[in-house]
Image (cartoon, grey):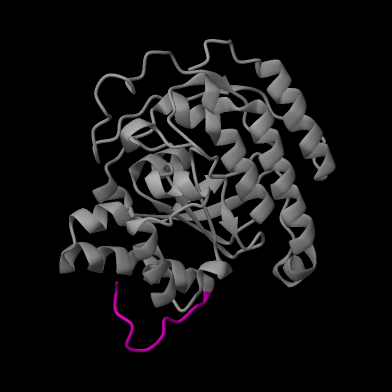
Amino acid sequence: MSSAPIDIERLVRQHAQTSRLLGVDFVPAYRRGVEIESPEKPAASGVHAATTPPVAIPPVAVPRGAPAHQKELDRPAAQRALDALRERYERDAPHEAFVTAHTNIVFGEGDPRARLMFVGEAPGEEEDKTGRPFVGRAGQLLNKMIEAMGLAREDVYICNVLKTRPPNNATPTPTEAALCEPYLLEQVGIVSPEVIVTLGLPATRTLLKSDESMARLRGRWGSLALSDGRSIPVMPTYHPAYLLRNYTPEARGKVWADLCLAMERLGLQPPKGRPAS
C-alpha cells in the first residue's frame, strides 16, 4: 500500500486535458465523497477496514453524447477515448492509495457505444486473473441475464466502480469508490449509454448517492446527472453474486422485473419463452 499523498492538482490537469480532447473546455469545482455503508456484505476484517478520511475528488466533465443515429460512426473514436482513459488510469493508479490485492487492472469491456451499460462494484478472483469484468460464476449468471434480454455480451458495456480486486473480495469502502469514481464517470460519458443497470448496493450508491437499502432502491428508476447537464436513467438491481447466494424464485423474479424495466426503456422485447435466469 502506497503512503504517498494524492496529487489532486495533477489529476485535475490530466482530466482537463482529456476533456478538451473530447470537446469539453471546463472542469467543475471540487466536491467531497459521501460516506456510505453497505449492508449487503461485511468488509473483510482487519486489512480492508477504512482508516483514512474521505478524499476530495473533483467531478469529471464528460462530453455530450452523440445522437443514436451517429453512434455507429463514433464507435472507433469512442474506443480510442476509452483506451486513452485506461492509460491515464494506469498512470494515475488511484488504487495505490488503498489496500489492494490485484494482479491485473480490470477496466471494462464491450461495445464502446452500447445502449445498455452494467456497473458492478469490483473485480473478483477470476476477473483479476483474466483482466476482464464479470467472468467468474457471477459473470456467467450475468451472461445468462443479458441473453434473456435478447442481447449478447458484445452488445453491452460492462465495468466496475473499482478497477482492481479488493483483498478477500471485500466491499469497496466509500473512500475507495470516491477515488475511482472520476474514471467511472468518464467511462459513462464516453460510452454514453441510454440506460445504466447497477449491480448491487455499492455501485448503486456510488452513482445515485443514496443511503437507502437495495430492497428499496431496486425496481425504481434513478438518474445519474453528469457534469455537462446530461441525465442518464439508472435501474438498480441485485448483484449476480447475491442471486447465487439467494437463488430463489422470488429473488430471480425481482431481478428479471428490473431488467424488463430496462428493456422497456430501451424499446426492447425479450425473446418469447425466456424466463429470468
Task: Say which residue appears at 29% left-offset and 53% top-offset.
Answer: 241
Residue 177 in sight in this render: yes
Locate residue 258, reporting x and y percent. Answer: 35, 64
Q: Image point 24% across, 38% down: which residue? A: 41
The image shows residue 64 at horizontal and vertical percentages of 73, 51
* Residue occupying the far bottom of the picture: 272
Q: Quadrant of residue 274?
A: bottom left
Q: Is residue 101 above or below residue 228?
A: above
Q: Is residue 199 magenta?
A: no
Q: Is residue 41 above or below residue 199?
A: above
Q: Which residues are magenta?
A: 267-277
Q: Looking at the figure, which quarter contains the C terminus?
A: bottom left
Q: Nearer the viewer, residue 61 or 152?
A: 152
Q: 76 and 218: which one is in front?
A: 76
Say whether residue 77 is left or right of residue 144.
right
The one of 139 and 156 positioned closer to us in this rendering: 139
Majority secondary structure of the magenta segment? loop
Residue at image location 38% in from the left, 69% down from the top: 145
Count numbered badges in the picture: 0
**Residue 34 in sight here:** no
Vertical relation: 185 (above or below) 264: above
Left/right of residue 169 with respect to residue 69 in the rendered view:
left
